[in-house]
Image: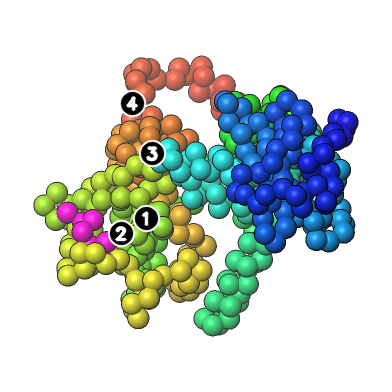
């Protein structure tokens, strides 16, 4: 620590008693960019620090009460010497902050979410994922103290996170108990799919975390980005989901669903909208003239217009009547849906329909799958789903209809008009006789 200064005006109580009370502090320079101040009032004085923060600007910070009327305790009441030490400490903290030494992972995540929100990206979704998966222990880490091992430990812990999974299992168990349906034991394929989904979710969180840390590095809050460049995503975790409903399964699901849930499920299957997008839709978002549904708030931050076929348009016309500024999808009692309630009702409908489990998001897969089966271009499907380009559709939805893919290939392979020779036929027959022996 720098050497303490002497000052005849501020060092003792007696000297400070002779000073005039005034709003402007009495300053004593301690070093370049740092001064100790004493503000005199009728009830006593207070110690302040004046710190240089750059760009010809200074910041003042109150340190503690001066020992004018009480003995110093080193915390709330400080002597002149103690006040100098507190000022040097404040200057050190300010210098470390300016150099990015006090900038934490939590600061980086908070700044990144603010950036996403200002840039009209999916800030809410990113904030929810980061809040759920990034532990307090990692958030409190300073970027200057961050190591690759810290991130590897976090990644393994994030994969084992079970809080939400337990809640979902409890909700499903209650729903099955009400409907008197015995809980089905998950198959090996389903367990593998659940494991893949967990890894895929953590991969998305890794992308967000890296984005936040890279932005912090670009803004000068870290001296190196080496610790997180070594953070690896889980391999073979982002394969496309294959669960989608046939037309028959969709009809069975709708017939088995409750009257209050059925319009929401129909809208999901016939528009491909996400659950949150549909719950925000109001009557004014349906345009009867163009037969389109406007999604004003989408995950990507940009609004879009979803074309509707005749059946869906007729349903929205009924729902939108007299509800220009009201949500179109509510419970029968007029209260807004909660995602947990939707999940419970959907589980009952699935059990009643006698189909394999399906999530609400897989209704979106159903929409995309049927469009692709009918030959709709990937770019058109991407626009309807709200993606910026066709890459996501090609990656996650394009192969959901393998039979259509195979039939299209078979129908367009050129035929050579060449019959197998008798020699080849005799060779195949001989192989068959040997196999029998």
Residue closest to the far left: 289
Which residue corresponds to mark 3?
387
Which tag is nearer the camera, tag 4 or tag 3?
3
- Mark 3, Cα crowd under 10 Å, few <14 / some 14-19 / many 20+, is some
Which tag is nearer the camera, tag 1 or tag 4?
1
Q: Quadrant of residue 206?
A: top right
| 293 is higher (above) or lower (below) than 25 | below
Label 1, label 3: how far apart the Cα atoms are: 14 Å
Residue 421 vs residue 61: left or right?
Answer: left
Which residue corresponds to mark 2?
281
Relative depth, front residue between 275 and 84: 84
Give the mark nearest the N terminus, 1 or 3. 1
Which residue corresponds to mark 4?
412
Query: Residue 208 at what x, y percent from top left?
Result: 58, 39
Q: Is 382 within the magenta? A: no
Q: Quadrant of the N terminus?
A: top right
Which tag is nearer the camera, tag 2 or tag 4?
2
Residue 178 vs residue 12: left or right?
Answer: left
Residue 422 vs residue 36: left or right?
Answer: left
Instruction: Name the colour scheme.
Output: rainbow
Query: Residue 337 at what x, y percent from top left?
Result: 41, 70
Q: Quadrant of residue 227?
A: top right
- Residues drawn in magenta: 282-287
Label 2, label 1: how far apart the Cα atoms are: 6 Å
Q: Residue drawn 23% across and 48% down?
A: 307
Label 3, label 2: how far apart the Cα atoms are: 19 Å
């Amino acid at each position: 620590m720098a050497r303490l200064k002497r000052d005849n005006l501020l060092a003792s109580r007696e000297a400070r008693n002779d000073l005039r009370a005034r709003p402007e502090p009495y300053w004593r320079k301690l070093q370049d960019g740092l001064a100790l101040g004493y503000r005199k009032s009728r009830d006593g004085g207070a110690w302040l620090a004046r710190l240089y923060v750059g760009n010809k600007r200074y910041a003042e910070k109150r340190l503690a009460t001066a020992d004018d009327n009480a003995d110093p305790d080193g915390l709330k009441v400080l002597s002149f010497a103690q006040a100098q030490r507190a000022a040097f400490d404040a200057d050190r903290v300010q210098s470390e902050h300016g150099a990015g030494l006090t900038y934490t992972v939590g600061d980086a995540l908070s700044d990144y979410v603010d950036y996403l929100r200002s840039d009209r990206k999916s800030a809410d979704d990113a904030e929810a994922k980061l809040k759920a998966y990034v532990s307090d222990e990692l958030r409190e880490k300073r970027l200057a103290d961050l190591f690759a091992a810290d991130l590897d430990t976090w990644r393994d812990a994030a994969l084992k996170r079970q809080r939400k999974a337990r809640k979902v299992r409890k909700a499903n168990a209650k729903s099955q108990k009400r409907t008197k349906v015995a809980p089905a034991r998950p198959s090996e394929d389903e367990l593998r799919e659940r494991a893949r989904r967990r890894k895929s979710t953590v991969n998305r969180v890794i992308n967000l975390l890296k984005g936040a840390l890279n932005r912090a590095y670009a803004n000068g809050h870290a001296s190196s980005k080496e610790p997180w460049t070594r953070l690896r995503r889980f391999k073979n975790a982002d394969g496309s989901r294959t669960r989608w409903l046939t037309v028959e399964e969709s009809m069975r699901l709708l017939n088995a669903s409750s009257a209050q849930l059925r319009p929401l499920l129909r809208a999901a299957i016939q528009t491909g909208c996400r659950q949150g997008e549909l719950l925000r839709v109001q009557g004014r978002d349906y345009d009867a003239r163009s037969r389109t549904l406007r999604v004003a708030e989408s995950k990507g931050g940009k609004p879009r217009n979803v074309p509707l076929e005749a059946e869906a348009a007729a349903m929205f016309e009924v729902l939108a009547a007299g509800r220009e500024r009201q949500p179109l999808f509510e419970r029968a009692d007029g209260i807004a849906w909660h995602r947990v309630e939707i999940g419970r009702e959907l589980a009952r409908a699935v059990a009643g329909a006698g189909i394999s489990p399906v999530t609400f998001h897989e209704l979106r897969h159903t929409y995309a799958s049927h469009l692709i089966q009918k030959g709709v271009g990937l770019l058109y499907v991407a626009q309807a789903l709200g993606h910026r380009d066709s890459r996501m559709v090609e990656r996650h939805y394009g192969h959901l209809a393998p039979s259509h893919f195979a039939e299209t290939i078979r129908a367009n392979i050129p035929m050579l008009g060449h019959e197998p020779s008798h020699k080849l036929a005799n060779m195949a027959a001989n192989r068959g006789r040997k196999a029998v022996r």
